[in-house]
Image (spheres, rainbow, N blue to C red):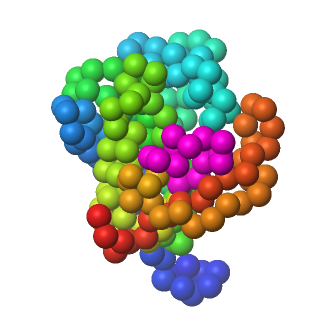
């Protein structure tokens, strides 16, 4: 029970941080796994921070391997604090080729936002869809969240296709809701609810 409202929490505090972050298998020998503090993952994050598309759509930059390692440490801290949980998309025992995760986690309210990106060499084969679908299933059925949202600029149709193919229903357009490198964008809001088919 939360002290403020007396309403029971959808997901009890401590559930996200308890134990090790799970490894979630993906098709094709890939997996969602925790980011590692090694050179390969730091280099992958550094590469992502220099990719024009990733930096534009995510306001994301990483200037060095040391900065990448510090960012990875912050990712792990967010899971311990239960405000987020971020996975590397990677081949088994290989370096990261993308990222998928939960931002703005509210365990008591049972909600979170899905975020993701994929490095250029791994794009175009459905990897983002597979990662978003798998993470969404785990967040709703495994963690016990009730509602996940996926938001993207209306000028980013590729993300719209990812959301739709991963089973996130389009709910509407929010005006001037996302800041990107070229200014404020309208955003599409997609959502998936516990119990949705697929």
Q: Is residue 190 above or below residue 23?
A: below
Residue 42: x %, y % from top left: 46, 18
Q: Is residue 124 visible?
A: yes
Tally the numbered discs.
0
Magenta segment: does it hold 170?
Answer: no
Residue 71: x %, y % from top left: 55, 28
**Left or right of 25 on screen, residue 9:** right
**Residue reaching furthest to the bottom:** 6
Towards the viewer: 146 or 35: 146
Residue 35, located in which quarter of the rendered image?
Answer: top left
Residue 73: x %, y % from top left: 50, 31
Towards the viewer: 100 or 5: 100
Towards the viewer: 171 or 106: 171
Magenta segment: does it hold 154?
Answer: yes
Q: Residue at x 37, y 44 (%)?
A: 129
Q: Residue at x 41, y 13 (%)?
A: 39
Residue 162: x %, y % from top left: 44, 46
**Residue reaching furthest to the left:** 29
Q: Residue at x 32, y 57 (%)?
A: 138
Q: Residue at x 53, y 13 (%)?
A: 65
Q: Is residue 44 above or below residue 150?
A: above
Q: Quadrant of the C terminus?
A: bottom left
Residue 104, located in which quarter of the rendered image?
Answer: bottom right
Towards the viewer: 44 or 176: 176
Q: Is residue 102 visible?
A: no
User: Magenta part of the protein: which range?
Assistant: 150-162
């Amino acid at each position: 029970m939360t002290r403020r409202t007396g309403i029971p929490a959808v997901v009890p505090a401590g559930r996200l941080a308890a134990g090790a972050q799970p490894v979630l298998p993906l098709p094709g020998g890939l997996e969602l796994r925790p980011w590692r503090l090694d050179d390969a993952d730091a280099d992958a994050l550094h590469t992502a921070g220099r990719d024009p598309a990733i930096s534009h759509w995510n306001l994301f930059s990483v200037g060095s391997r040391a900065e990448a390692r510090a960012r990875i440490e912050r990712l792990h801290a967010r899971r311990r604090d239960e405000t987020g949980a971020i996975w590397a998309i990677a081949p088994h025992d290989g370096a990261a080729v993308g990222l998928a995760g939960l931002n703005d986690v509210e365990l008591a309210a049972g909600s979170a936002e899905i975020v993701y990106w994929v490095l250029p060499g791994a794009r175009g084969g459905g990897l983002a869809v597979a990662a978003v679908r798998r993470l969404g299933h785990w967040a709703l059925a495994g963690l016990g969240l009730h509602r996940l949202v996926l938001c993207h600029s209306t000028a980013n149709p590729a993300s719209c296709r990812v959301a739709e193919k991963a089973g996130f229903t389009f709910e509407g357009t929010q005006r001037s809701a996302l800041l990107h490198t070229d200014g404020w964008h309208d955003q599409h809001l997609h959502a998936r609810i516990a119990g949705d088919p697929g």
